[in-house]
Amino acid sequence: MSTMKFCRECNNILYPKDDKDRRVLLFACRNCEHQEIADNNCVYRNEVQHAAAERTQVLQDVASDPTLQRTREVRCASCGHGEAVFFQATARGEEGMTIFYVCCNPSCGNRWRE
């Protein structure tokens, strides 16, 4: 898929347009009458890629989320802090719900699950 198409006649941008009678996607110039059939039906594709650090940061930020439940019934294995936030979610590749804990110690941020 090319990023932009340009008119062969006047070099303006070609815009996607549907031909409902023939049921095809066209690229049409808004300046002249030039039209061409699209070689691909995909007009726009947005691929979002996350770095591993971004995913980790989201989990560490949940410790400061005031809407999540907190517990003092668990102790962090990393720093020994006695408070953690917890939430339920489905673990990757597993069925059912899993309880995830995040240590509330700002300098720790350890994550574990039950």
Image: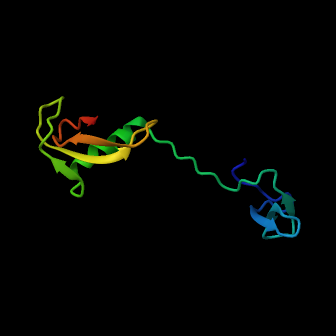
Please, is residue 37 above or below residue 106 in the view?
A: below
The residue depicted at 14 percent of the width and 31 percent of the height is: 79
The residue depicted at 29 percent of the width and 42 percent of the height is: 99
Q: x, y (%) of residue 19?
A: 83, 67
**Between 23 and 51, which is closer to the camera in this rendering?**
23
Q: In this view, does 30 lie to the left or right of 52?
A: right
Please, is residue 23 above or below residue 84 in the view?
A: below
Seen from this angle, which residue lies furthest top?
78
Q: Is residue 105 left or right of residue 50?
A: left
Total labels: the figure holds 0
**Between 94 and 105, which is closer to the camera in this rendering?**
94
**Between 51 and 22, which is closer to the camera in this rendering?**
22
The residue depicted at 80 percent of the width and 70 percent of the height is: 31
Q: x, y (%) of residue 49?
A: 51, 42
Q: x, y (%) of residue 114?
A: 27, 36
The residue depicted at 21 percent of the width and 52 percent of the height is: 69
Q: In this view, does 29 lie to the left or right of 57?
A: right
**Between 84 and 17, which is closer to the camera in this rendering?**
84
Q: x, y (%) of residue 58?
A: 33, 45
